Amino acid sequence: MTDKPSPGARTFAPFADDVAVQTIGGLSLENGRDAIAVHGSLDLTRDRAGLDRARALQAAVTAIVEALSGSDLPEAAEATVAEPTIVRNPFA
């Protein structure tokens, strides 16, 4: 498994859309317009592969920090919790 983007692959642009995901090892950064969700785990081993994963993580976090730094941010984001939708049980 490689952690380097393939030639021609799109670069992860933080907060640009609600669909992009960057995966580094077992760690996923899921893009959103209002938040970025981070899931999984990442082993940074003491070898070239670990160095590549560490650099990919550093680049992703740097891009997120730069995107946040270039914005006029509120003190805290408003919580957006959607009301649950009740659906008919198809098995009843």
Image: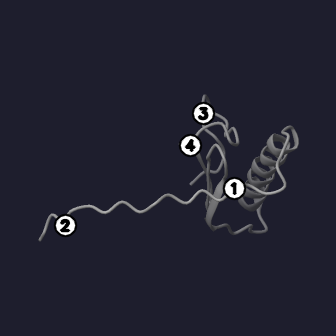
Closer to the camera, 30 or 9? 30
Residue 12 falls left or right of residue 1: right
Q: Position of residue 72 (x, y in %)?
A: 85, 40
Decide which of tag 3 and tag 1 comes sooner along the chain.
3
Q: Residue at horizontal 63%, vertical 58%?
A: 37
Rounded to the nearest angstrom, the CA distance separating label 2 from label 4 is 29 Å
Viewer-side label of 4, 1: 1
Viewer-side label of 2, 1: 1
Residue 61 falls left or right of residue 82: right
Decide which of tag 3 and tag 4 comes sooner along the chain.
3
Viewer-side label of 3, 2: 2
Q: Contact, CB < 8 Å: mark 3 with mark 2?
A: no
Q: Is residue 41 above or below residue 35?
A: below
Rounded to the nearest angstrom, the CA distance separating label 3 from label 2 is 42 Å
Badge 3 amino acid: Ala
Please name the residue that numbered disc 3 is placed on: 9
Rounded to the nearest angstrom, the CA distance separating label 3 from label 4 is 17 Å
Decide which of tag 4 and tag 1 comes sooner along the chain.
4
Please name the residue that numbered disc 2 is placed on: 89
Closer to the camera, 9 or 64? 64
Mark 1 crowd level (few <14, some 14–19, many ≥20, 10 Å Cα): few
Q: Is residue 92 above or below residue 69?
A: below
Q: Contact, CB < 8 Å: mark 3 with mark 1?
A: no
Rounded to the nearest angstrom, the CA distance separating label 2 from label 1 is 33 Å
Please name the residue that numbered disc 4 is placed on: 18
Please name the residue that numbered disc 1 is placed on: 78
Residue 82 falls left or right of residue 4: left
Q: Which mark is residue 54?
A: none
